[in-house]
Amino acid sequence: MTKILAVDDNQEALFALEALLRDAGYEVITAASGTETIAKITAENPDLVLLDVVMPRPDGYEVTAQVKADPVLRYIPIVLLTSKDSLDDVIHGLEQGADDYIKKPFRKEELLARVHAVLRTRQLYQELRDSNRLRSELQQRLSEKYNYANIVGRSAKMKALFETLEKVKDAEVPVLVSGESGTGKELVATALHYSSRRREKSLVVQNCSAFNENLLESELFGHVKGAFSGALKDKQGLFEIADGGTFFLDELGEMSLALQARLLRVLEDGSFIPVGATHPKKVDVRIVAATNRNLKEMVSKGTFREDLFYRLNVVPIELPPLRERREDIPHLVEHFLALVNSKRGSAKVFSPEALEALCDYGWPGNIRELRNEIERATLLSSADCIGAEALSPQILSAKALGAAGSAGTLGAAVQDLEKKMLLSTLTRLAWNKSEAARELGISRSSLIAKVQAFGLEQGSKS
Ligand SMILES: Nc1ncnc2c1ncn2[C@@H]1O[C@H](COP(=O)(O)OP(=O)(O)OP(=O)(O)O)[C@@H](O)[C@H]1O
Ligand SMILES: [Mg+2]
């Protein structure tokens, strides 16, 4: 029920006002002074305030100014009851932020009509505010989840990736995303969809290794009733569901040659024939494919269609393994730690040693491995500052090796050792390369290549 706060310091007038409103079907609460008004507005959150102007201080103007200055209360409409007939008073009241005014003495019908109008405006305003809030919340959630801001990376390689994404997001060409496991292929495919013009339509994801060939075929292209035993009715394929949107084909390298041929047709003219159907269907679908296999190599072995490869490879996006963009590791750690903390309401941080170990490790499982490690370590460690001992053993042993060498990964440690041995042998043998190569058990040309690669020269220090 609509609740109105009626305010007048004149008992009789207040009583009349209360009766009038109550008769009209409103719930009415009353106040007889400015101070009481503020208290009741705060406590009762009325839908509307009918406020007498002339009262001992704080008077109606002052109450209005105070309410309209409050970030929460300001949304409650105030209608001033002014007995003075001067325009100046009305202006002064509206300047304080009052929503409307009524001159005393008023006619019953006039008052109710004004009350009704103000309440209606308020309702429209509230609906607008609610729907705006809802919309921006939804948009926020979607964009937070999927825009590039969620793809962490400040390395040159990732910056180049963002540039490519920005260029191709609305280009109607297929995109082939490749990269080792856990490098973010699905994340990038999703970001592409949600930043493209197609974002309002579906993003359909299908893993090509998940089914046997026949199932995958009917999954992708649909089938008609009776196409095979068990096909009891027509079934829409995923390409149809993705119409107007984006189709993300994950693990494309696992697709059979027969299905590759049918996919090629979709890429060529958007058409396909559902299993058991006689007529083709046409769709408008953008294809984003991902693979962690080397498709080019598969082409040369004959396990992947060359024409399909070139069709898809119009815009190749190569996701670099994490070990090739180590400067991103601290940012990723911070990102995942913040996610974990906000999910669990915790405030955990890594100790400098733990952070160093995370930065030194090789991350063969790339970002997925990093993410899992952070979730694991934050769960296992009860302390707010997570020490290195909470990390997985392989990360710690990489760190121990790193301490022996200079950089961090096993590869780096081995290289460091190699460089030291080369230099010390060459120095001892007065840079006789043939001798040194023999002693080190490698060919002379290989020794020369290594010397060049490490930038060693006579007089170099290890
Ligand atoms: N640059 C990044 N910034 C933030 N999170 C990332 C980034 N890259 C990957 N991730 C996260 O790492 C996890 C693995 O990413 P994703 O599933 O996209 O990898 P993938 O390349 O598809 O792996 P697979 O080949 O194993 O399917 C996901 O949780 C993803 O959100
Ligand atoms: Mg994936």
Image: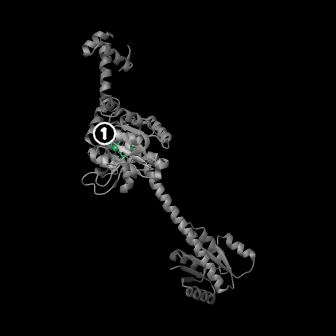
Q: Which quarter of the figure has residue 432?
A: top left
Q: In the image, is 91 to the left or to the right of 198?
A: right
Amino acid beneath label 1: Ala
Q: Measured along the vertical axis of the image, is residue 61 above or below residue 251? A: below
Tell me if residue 334 can be seen.
Answer: no
Q: How is the image coloured?
A: one colour
Label 1 crowd bin: few (<14), some (14–19), many (20+), radius 10 Å: few
Q: Measured from the top left, where is residue 306 in percent x and y?
A: 36, 32
Look at 37% across and 41% down and name the residue there.
263
Q: Residue drawn 31% across and 16% down? A: 446
Residue with the most extreme front position: 278
Q: Position of residue 398 (x, y in %)?
A: 29, 35
Image quadrant occupied by the C terminus: top left
Q: Is residue 213 above or below residue 310?
A: below
The CB of the residue at mark 1 lies under 8 Å from ligand 2: no
* Residue under label 1: 258
Residue 329 location, quadrant: top left
SS for tag 1?
helix
Drawn side of residue 332 relative to residue 114, left or right: left
Dividing the image into four quarters, tell me where ligand 1 lies. Answer: top left
Position in image of residue 313 (x %, y %): 41, 35
